[in-house]
Image (tube, rainbow, N blue to C red):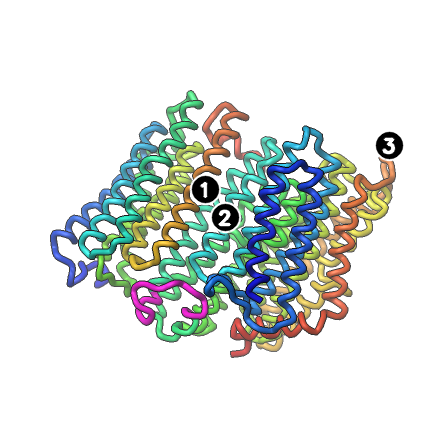
C-alpha cells in the first residue's frame, strides 16, 4: 500500500507542473484525470483495513487519516470536473488565467492531500501552511478589489493563526522530550505511545494553542473572520475546495492534537475546549445565515455552522457521536461542494451574487437549479442525504452521553440555520423567472459535477458501503471514542 | 515563578548573553510597534532576526549542536537578507513610505504592549517548563514578542506593518523553539524556514497587487467586505 501513498504525493504535483507549462486544453483534462486518479488511489486504501506507510514511515495513513483523505480526494475530483466547465465558460485571455488557475488548483489539492498523509506533527503543520499560501493566491486570482481584500485578510489571519499552531507543535515536542529524549521525530504513533507520561499542563497548553491556531483555518468562531470574505470572493471551484476540504483538513490537525491530549490529560479537557468553540461557531453562524445578502457568504456561514457541529460532536463522549462527526466530514464535503457548484451556475447565469437580484433559479437552470435546492436540503440535514445520517448520529450521541440540554441547543441552532438557508434558497430558486432571462445551463460539465456530489450524498445517507462504515468505526476508535 | 530561573547547569556568562539577546528581541518588537516609517520597521525586523540568529549561534557554541549553526546561518540568509530585500522591493514601488497608520496614540499602544508582555511573561512563568540549553526567560520573552506582534498587526493599518508583524511573530516562535525544541530535527526547522520564505513571497505578491490597485499601502481600502 506504500506505493499508493507515494503515487498520491506525485500525481497532483505532476498535474501542477503540467498545467503550468502545457496549454489549457491539455491542463484541464489532465487535472480531471489527476483528480479522478487521486480519488481512485484513496478509495483503493479502503479495502486493506490496515495502516499504510511509505518513505520510511514519513507517509502514513491510518483510519483517521483515510477519512479525511477520502474527503479531500473526492473534492479534488469533483472540483476538477466542475472547474473545466467553469473556467471554459468564463475566461478568454489566451489561456494565461486557465494555466495559473489549474496549476494552483492542483497544487492546492496536493497540499491538502499531503496533510492527512504525512505522519508527523511538524510536516502536518508545513502542509497546512502550504495550503494557506497557495489558496491565498487562488482567492486573489480574479484580481478584483474584493478578491485582493479577501486574500490579504485570509493570508494574514490564517498565517497568524498558524504561527500559534507552530507554537503548539513546539510545545507538544517539549512535552514529548520527557520520555522520548531531546532529539526525536514528531511521529504520531511515537507521541501516542508516550503520551501517558507527558506533563498535563504542557499538553493542555499545546492543545489550546492548536485549537486556536488550526481553528483559525477551520473557521471556528471567533477566529473565523477571514472565512466569509475568502469564500465569497474566490472563484467558485476554489470556494468549494476551501469549504469542503480545507476546513476539514484543519479539523484533522486538531484531531491529531486531540488524540495525544486525550491520552495525556483525559478526554474531558479537549472535549470542553471543543464544545466552547463549537457552540460559539454554531450560534453565530446560525444567526448570520439568516441575514446574508450574498449567495456565497450564505454558504460560507453554513460552513462555519458545520464546523461548529463537528466540534460539538467531538465533545460528546459516546462513540456514535464521534462516528457521526467523521461521517459528517465526508457528507459535508459532498454537500457543500455541490451547493457551491450550484451557486457557481447561478452566478454565471445571473451575473451577480446578490440574493436580492436573483430569482427564478429553477426556471432558469433546468439542471443546476433543482440540484442546488437538493444540495441546500442536504446541507440542512434532510433525508435521504448523508448529513441527515451524520447529524442524527451526533444528536443520538449527545443523548446517549446524557448531554440532553446541549443536544437541545444543538438541534435548536441547527434548525435556525436551516430556516435561514432554506428561506434564502427558496427566494432565489422557487420564484418566477424574470423577463429576459433565458432558460438553459451555462455549461454542460458543471451540472455533472453536481450529480456526482448528490449521488455521493445519497449513498452516504441511504446505505454507506460496508467498508466505509468499518473505516469510520475504526477511525472513531482511534480517537478513543467510548474510552 | 520557578520557570523563570536560569538553568542550573548553564554557565552564567552564556545565560546572561542569552537573556540580553532575548530582551533585545523584545525591545525591537516594541520599536517596530511604534516606528513611523515602513523602512524603519523592516530594518528593525532585520535586526530582530539577527538577534534571534545570534541566540542560535550562542546555543550552538555552548552546547556543541552543529545543526543550530546551520539553522542560524539559514536564518541570517533568509530573515536578515532575503525577507527585508523582498519588502524593500515592494516599498521601492510605493511612494508613501510614511506609515502613519496607528489606530491609537503611540503611548496607548506601548502601554498596551507592556501589559501584554507582562501577561505573557507571567503565564510562561506559571508553566512547568525547564530547559538545559537556555534560560526559560527566553521563552517568556518569546511569549511577549508573539503577543506584541499580534498587537502590531491589530493596531497598524498598513500592509507593511501587518506583514512585518507576522514575520516578527515567526521570530518569537523561533525564539521559543530554542527553549522548547532545540533538539528538533534540522529537517523540520528547514521546512519551517522554507515555509516562511513561501509565505513571504505570497505576502509580497499581495502587497504589490494591493498597491497596484489602490496606489496605497494603507489597509483602509481593505475594509469593504463585512457581515
Of all residues, the one furthest to the top in this rendering is B95
Q: Nearer the viewer, residue A401 or A179?
A: A179
The residue indicated by pointer 3 is: A436
Disc 2 and disc 1 in contact, CB within 8 angstroms: yes
Residue at 61% in and 45% down: A105
Where's residue A257, x and y in %? 46, 64
Residue at 49% in and 27% down: B211
Extent of the magenta region: A175-191
The residue indicated by pointer 2 is: A130
Report which quarter residue B77 is drawn in: top left
Q: Is residue A288 visible?
A: no
Q: Is residue B158 left or right of residue A394?
A: left
Residue at 48% in and 25% down: B216
Of all residues, the one furthest to the front in this rendering is A3
Residue at 70% in and 33% down: A91
Query: Alpha-carbon distance for marks 3 and 2?
Result: 45 Å
Where's residue A393, x and y in %? 66, 71
Badge 2 and badge 1 in a common chain: no
Q: Secondary structure at mark 1?
A: helix
Chain letter for mark 2, please: A
* Circle 3 or circle 1, nearest the eye: 1
The residue indicated by pointer 1 is: B198
Vertical comparison of B12 with A99: above or below = below
Chain letter for mark 1, please: B
Q: Secondary structure at mark 2?
A: helix
Q: Residues within 10 Å of mark 1 (few under 14, many from 20)?
A: some
Q: Nearer the viewer, residue A373 or A36?
A: A36
Amino acid at each position: 500500500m506504500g506505493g499508493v501513498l507515494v503515487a498520491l504525493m506525485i500525481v497532483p504535483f505532476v498535474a501542477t507542473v503540467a498545467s503550468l507549462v502545457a496549454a489549457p486544453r491539455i491542463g484541464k483534462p489532465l487535472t480531471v484525470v489527476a483528480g479522478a486518479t487521486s480519488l481512485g488511489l484513496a478509495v483503493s486504501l479502503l479495502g486493506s483495513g490496515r495502516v499504510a506507510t511509505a518513505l520510511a514511515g514519513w507517509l502514513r495513513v491510518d483510519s483517521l487519516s483515510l477519512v479525511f483523505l477520502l474527503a479531500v480526494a473526492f473534492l479534488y475530483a469533483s472540483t476538477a470536473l466542475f472547474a473545466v466547465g467553469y473556467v471554459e465558460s468564463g475566461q478568454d485571455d489566451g489561456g494565461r488565467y486557465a494555466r495559473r488557475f489549474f496549476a494552483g488548483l492542483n497544487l492546492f489539492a496536493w497540499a491538502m492531500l499531503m496533510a492527512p498523509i504525512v505522519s508527523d506533527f511538524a510536516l502536518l503543520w508545513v502542509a497546512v501552511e502550504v495550503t494557506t499560501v497557495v489558496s491565498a493566491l487562488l482567492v486573489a486570482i480574479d484580481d478584483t478589489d474584493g478578491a485582493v481584500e479577501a486574500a490579504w485578510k485570509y493570508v494574514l489571519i490564517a498565517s497568524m493563526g498558524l504561527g500559534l499552531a507552530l507554537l503548539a507543535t513546539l510545545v507538544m515536542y517539549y512535552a514529548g522530550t520527557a520520555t522520548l529524549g531531546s532529539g526525536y521525530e514528531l511521529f504520531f504513533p511515537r507521541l501516542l505511545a508516550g503520551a501517558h507520561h507527558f506533563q498535563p499542563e504542557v499538553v493542555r497548553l499545546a492543545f489550546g494553542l492548536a485549537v486556536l491556531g488550526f481553528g483559525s483555518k477551520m473557521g471556528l468562531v471567533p477566529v473565523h473572520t477571514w472565512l466569509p470574505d475568502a469564500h465569497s470572493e474566490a472563484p467558485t471551484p476554489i470556494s468549494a475546495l476551501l469549504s469542503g476540504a480545507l476546513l476539514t483538513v484543519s479539523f484533522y490537525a486538531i484531531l491529531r492534537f486531540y488524540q495525544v491530549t486525550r491520552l495525556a490529560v483525559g478526554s474531558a479537557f479537549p472535549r470542553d475546549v471543543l464544545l466552547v468553540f463549537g457552540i460559539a461557531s454554531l450560534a453565530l453562524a446560525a444567526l448570520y445565515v439568516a441575514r446574508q445578502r450574498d449567495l456565497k457568504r450564505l454558504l460560507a456561514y453554513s460552513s462555519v455552522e458545520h464546523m461548529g457541529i463537528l466540534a460539538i460532536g467531538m465533545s460528546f463522549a459516546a462513540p456514535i457521536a464521534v462516528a457521526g462527526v467523521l461521517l459528517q466530514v465526508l457528507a459535508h464535503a459532498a454537500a457543500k461542494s455541490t451547493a457551491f457548484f450550484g451557486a457557481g451556475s447561478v452566478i454565471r447565469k445571473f451575473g451577480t451574487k446578490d440574493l436580492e437580484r436573483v430569482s427564478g433559479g429553477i426556471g432558469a437552470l433546468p439542471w443546476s437549479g433543482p440540484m442546488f435546492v437538493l444540495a441546500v436540503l442536504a446541507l440542512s440535514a434532510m433525508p435521504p442525504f448523508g448529513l441527515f445520517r451524520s447529524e442524527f448520529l451526533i444528536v443520538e450521541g449527545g443523548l446517549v452521553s446524557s448531554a440532553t440540554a446541549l443536544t437541545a441547543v444543538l438541534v435548536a441552532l441547527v434548525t435556525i440555520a436551516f430556516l435561514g438557508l432554506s428561506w434564502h434558497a427558496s427566494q432565489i430558486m422557487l420564484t418566477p423567472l424574470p423577463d429576459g432571462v433565458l432558460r438553459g445551463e451555462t455549461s454542460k460539465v458543471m451540472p455533472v459535477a453536481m450529480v456526482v456530489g448528490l449521488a455521493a450524498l445519497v449513498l452516504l445517507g441511504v446505505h454507506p458501503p460496508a467498508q466505509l462504515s468499518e473505516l469510520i468505526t475504526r477511525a472513531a476508535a482511534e480517537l478513543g471514542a467510548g474510552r | 515563578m520557578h520557570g523563570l530561573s536560569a538553568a542550573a547547569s548553564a554557565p552564567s556568562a552564556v545565560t546572561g548573553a542569552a537573556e540580553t539577546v532575548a530582551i533585545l528581541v523584545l525591545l525591537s518588537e516594541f520599536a517596530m510597534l511604534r516606528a513611523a516609517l515602513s523602512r524603519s520597521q523592516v530594518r528593525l525586523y532585520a535586526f530582530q532576526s539577527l538577534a534571534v540568529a545570534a541566540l542560535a549561534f550562542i546555543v550552538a557554541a555552548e552546547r556543541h549542536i552543529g545543526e543550530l549553526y546551520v539553522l542560524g546561518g539559514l536564518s541570517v540568509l533568509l530573515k536578515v537578507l532575503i525577507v527585508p530585500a523582498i519588502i524593500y522591493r515592494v516599498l521601492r514601488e510605493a511612494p508613501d513610505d510614511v506609515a502613519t497608520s496607528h489606530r491609537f496614540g503611540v503611548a496607548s499602544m506601548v502601554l498596551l504592549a507592556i501589559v501584554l508582555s507582562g501577561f505573557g511573561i507571567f503565564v510562561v512563568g506559571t508553566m512547568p517548563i525547564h530547559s538545559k540549553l537556555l534560560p526559560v526567560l527566553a521563552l517568556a520573552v518569546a511569549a511577549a514578542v508573539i503577543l506584541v506582534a499580534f498587537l502590531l498587526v491589530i493596531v497598524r493599518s498598513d500592509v507593511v506593518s501587518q506583514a512585518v508583524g507576522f514575520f516578527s511573530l515567526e521570530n518569537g516562535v523561533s525564539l521559543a523553539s530554542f527553549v522548547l525544541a532545540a533538539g528538533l530535527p534540522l529537517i523540520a526547522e528547514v521546512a519551517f524556514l522554507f515555509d516562511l520564505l513561501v509565505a513571504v513571497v505570497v505576502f509580497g505578491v499581495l502587497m504589490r497587487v494591493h498597491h497596484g490597485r489602490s496606489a496605497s499601502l494603507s489597509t483602509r481600502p481593505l475594509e469593504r467586505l463585512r457581515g
